[in-house]
Amino acid sequence: MSEPLISAPLVFRDDGTPYSPRHDDIYHSAAGALAQARHVFLKGNGLPARWRGTPRFTVIETGFGMGVNFLATWAAWLEAAHRPSMLEFLSIEKYPFSADDLRAAHAAIIDEDAFAPLSDALASAWPPLEAGLHRLAFSAGAVTLTLAFGDAADILPRLADLGFTADAIYLDGFAPARNPDMWTPQVFASLARMSNYDATFATYTSAGQVKRALVESGFAYSKVAGFGGKRAMLVGKRAHIRYVIES
């Protein structure tokens, strides 16, 4: 029997950074949630430039958390002169917040006025905290968010069987040392199976176990400058020849 869905408590450290007691880790850098999303996940996947000329683009994310990466991606889509007609975002979360806590979190960590209507729309459409898939639609249906509540190791193979594919992968979630179940070779193998030919990925971590799991699953990575005091992060793509790029 699968373990029941447990909501995440909303906790802040003394510096105002949201914190997970379960994983003893923070949800984003103290340097800023939106800035981290833009640097690590948007820039790391070459967005929004890669949207030019594509009718449909799909992002798969391994940890929804407070939804900041989704909001940043949606906002970039709204602002992009050349954007796909359809933006699909699929995100997995084992310990989702309640809608009220999601609103409170956004009020505390997002200080750009343009995000207020996006945050409100997300919280207003927030599904019941029940395991499984929940599909939400925004921007007159042009932006869809599929929330997969449950354990990534269980959900990803099922999503692959259902035909979900990725053009970009946001490898998020708590640090590998704090949440090792999110960074296993099995998780990366499922993501590789779901990756389109030119799929890319980005992650804030450069941990050795992540690099090894990426290579074993057929991804090529580069080390680039990290965010918020981190020296390095990883970006890369599905490798069609097995090799690793170091920089």
Image (tube, rainbow, N blue to C red):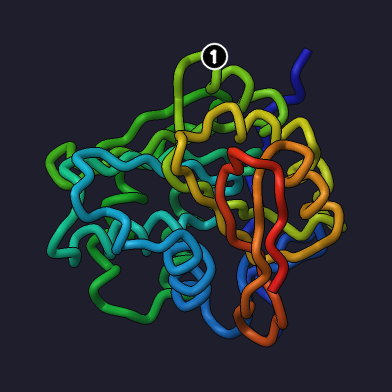
Q: Residue at x 41, y 72 (%)?
A: 107
Q: Say few, some or many: other residues with alpha carbon within 10 Å of mark 1 (under 14 / 14 to 19 / 20 or more).
A: few
Q: Where residue 104 sits: x, y (%)?
A: 46, 65
Q: Secondary structure at mark 1?
A: helix
Q: Where residue 129 sits: x, y (%)?
A: 53, 33
206 left or right of 202 in image: right
Q: Residue at x 27, y 68 (%)?
A: 116
Tell me how many marks there are.
Answer: 1
Of 153 and 106, nearer the camera is: 153
Image quadrant holding the N terminus, namely: top right
17 left or right of 132 in image: right
Of 12 and 51, nearer the camera is: 51
Report the amino acid beneath label 1.
Answer: Asp
Q: Residue at x 81, y 62 (%)?
A: 207
Residue 30, relative to residue 131: is it above or below?
A: below
Check the image and name the residue furthest to the front: 241
Residue 245, relative to residue 16: is it above or below?
A: above
Of 94 and 56, nearer the camera is: 56
Q: Where residue 125 sits: x, y (%)?
A: 31, 41
Image quadrant holding the C terminus, namely: bottom right
Q: Residue at x 74, y 43 (%)?
A: 182
Identify the residue under disc 1: 161
Q: For residue 50, what is the image quadrant?
A: bottom left
Residue 124, relative to residue 1: is it above or below?
A: below
